[in-house]
Image: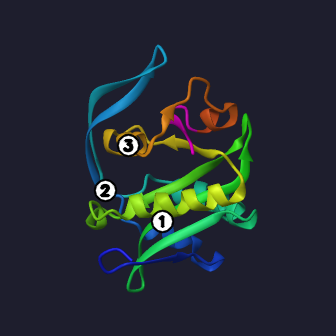
Amino acid sequence: MTMGTIIRPLQRAEVELVWQIERREVVQEIYEVADGRLHLRPQFYDTREWPDGEPEIYTPILFDCFDHDGVFLGAFAGEKLVAAGVVDARPVGDYPNLRQLAFLHVSHDWRGKKLALRLYQLCKDTVVGSGAEGFYISSTPTRRTVEFYLRQGAKLMARPDTTLVSIEPDDIHLAHWF
């Protein structure tokens, strides 16, 4: 429990609650990969909500993950889902020893309360218990997000997974071996 929240597994009927998470964020800088290294560059945007079409595109992917024994953890403040972490139980194509951390988001007003860290650790526990060696993370390139994963021990992938990089070419592809 973290400051008035309860973290518990989500049921299949609750998967679509992830779109309740308030994604609002002002971004000042993003990371890019060049010459095999991370480079920070200025880029401003004010994210108010989920991008148009994202719930329609990703909801079937999340259900598919759930139906293949994916791990779905939600942090609830009362009845409202305020953060969620999802791990796909299936091996990552080019890295069968890794499992994809498919989703980790915390509502704007709940950031800074260690919910992302707690969810990350709980998701990590499920990966360790499954015999996998770590996470594959296709991270949004925002400074805040990438640096969160780097602080957890993730490293830039020299050779990103072929399928995942084709789906999210602008993401920063990281791995965290445990």
Which residue is at a point 61% across and 46% down the rendered structure image?
134
Task: Give how far apart the Cα atoms at labels 3 and 2 are.
Answer: 26 Å
Which image quadrant for residue 89?
bottom right
Which residue is at a point 55% across and 29% down the rendered structure image?
157
User: Pointers 3 and 1 in contact (CB under 8 A)?
Assistant: no
Circle 3 residue: 151
Q: Earlier in the sequence, mark 3 or mark 1?
A: 1
Q: Is residue 173 magenta?
A: yes
In the image, what residue type sits under mark 1?
Ala
Q: Is residue 149 magenta?
A: no
Q: Is residue 122 shown to the viewer in this render?
A: yes
Circle 1 residue: 84
Task: Please tell me whether mark 1 sits on a helix, a strand or a loop.
Answer: strand
User: Pointers 1 and 2 in contact (CB under 8 A)?
Assistant: no
Residue 110, position as x, y percentages in the image: 30, 67
In the image, what residue type sits under mark 3?
Arg
Camera-near label (3 vs 2) is 3
Camera-near label (1 vs 2) is 1
Q: Is residue 160 left or right of residue 40?
A: right
Which image quadrant for residue 63?
bottom right
Task: Give how far apart the Cα atoms at labels 1 and 2 are.
Answer: 18 Å
In the image, what residue type sits under mark 2?
Arg
Task: Please tell me whether mark 2 sits on a helix, a strand or a loop.
Answer: loop
Vertical position of residue 154 compared to residue 104: above or below: above
Q: Which residues are magenta?
A: 168-178
